[in-house]
Image: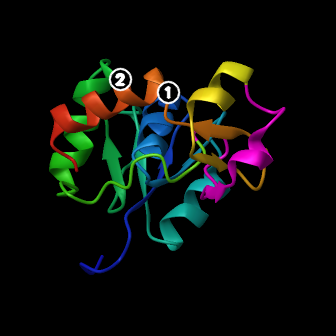
Amino acid sequence: MHSGQEVKFLCDQNLGRLAKWLRLMGFDTMYMHLWDDDMVKNALSSHRVVLTRAHNKELTDGYMVIRDDKINLQLKQVINALDLKGKAKPFSRCSICNEPLYPIGREEAKGYVPEYVFLTHDTFSKCPKCLRIYWRGTHMTRALDMINTLGIR
């Protein structure tokens, strides 16, 4: 993988939380609900790193076995192994469907977010696929704390 190339991932069925956190950090991360050999083959051919808990698979280049159960240690392993410090783009992807988010105007969010949120926030983002709307709430502050603790920004 050359240095200018964006790091992309495929998480196996045992790493749903890791997939969500990698997306929160802005990394293109696909997720398999069940192990799918074709999906893995496609991921490897498109230079995705396959993250797995499966110690019993015949692993070749492009795979990384995630050792820990705790999410912060899983993230630390991935970040350190792939030298991802400074490469995060927090909250730039949908944490559910992995699509890049786009900014929307405050008026466009009206009626789709809680009234209090509409009244107290100015900036919103939207997922083009699932149409979920995001804003910088307390969950983002907690997520940023974790990201900053890991030193990834």
Q: Secondary structure at mark 2?
A: helix
Q: Quadrant of the N terminus?
A: bottom left
* Amino acid type at mark 2: Arg
Name the residue located 22 percent from the left edge and 50 percent from the top edge. Answer: 153
Q: Which residues are magenta?
A: 95-113
Residue 70 found in image quarter? top left
**Crowding near the residue tagged with mark 1, few <14, some 14–19, many ≥20 C-alpha atoms within 10 Å:** few
Whether residue 146 sits left or right of residue 124 in the image: it is: left
Residue 26 visible from this viewpoint: yes
In the figure, residue 145 lies in which quadrant? top left
Q: Amino acid under label 1?
A: Gly
**Residue drawn where x is 20% and y is 58% of the image:** 86
- Relative to 3, residue 53 above or below: above
- Residue beneath label 2, please? 142
Question: Which residue shows up at 66% across the image and 34% down it?
Answer: 34
* Badge 1 or badge 2: first in the primary sequence: 1
**Where is residue 74 shown, x and y percent of the image?**
28, 31
Between circles 1 and 2, the one closer to the viewer is 1
**SS state under label 1:** loop
The overriding secondary structure of the stretch rendered in magenta is loop
Residue in front for this viewpoint, 114 or 54: 114
Residue 127 horizontal side relative to residue 71, left or right: right
Residue furthest front as drawn = 119
In the picture of the structure, the residue carrying the numbered disc 1 is 137
Tell me, yes or no, if residue 67 can be seen here: no
Q: How is the image coloured?
A: rainbow
**x and y percent of residue 99 in the render?**
64, 55
**Which class describes the residues within 10 Å of circle 2: few (<14), some (14-19), or many (20+)?**
few
Q: Position of residue 31 (x, y in %)?
A: 59, 42
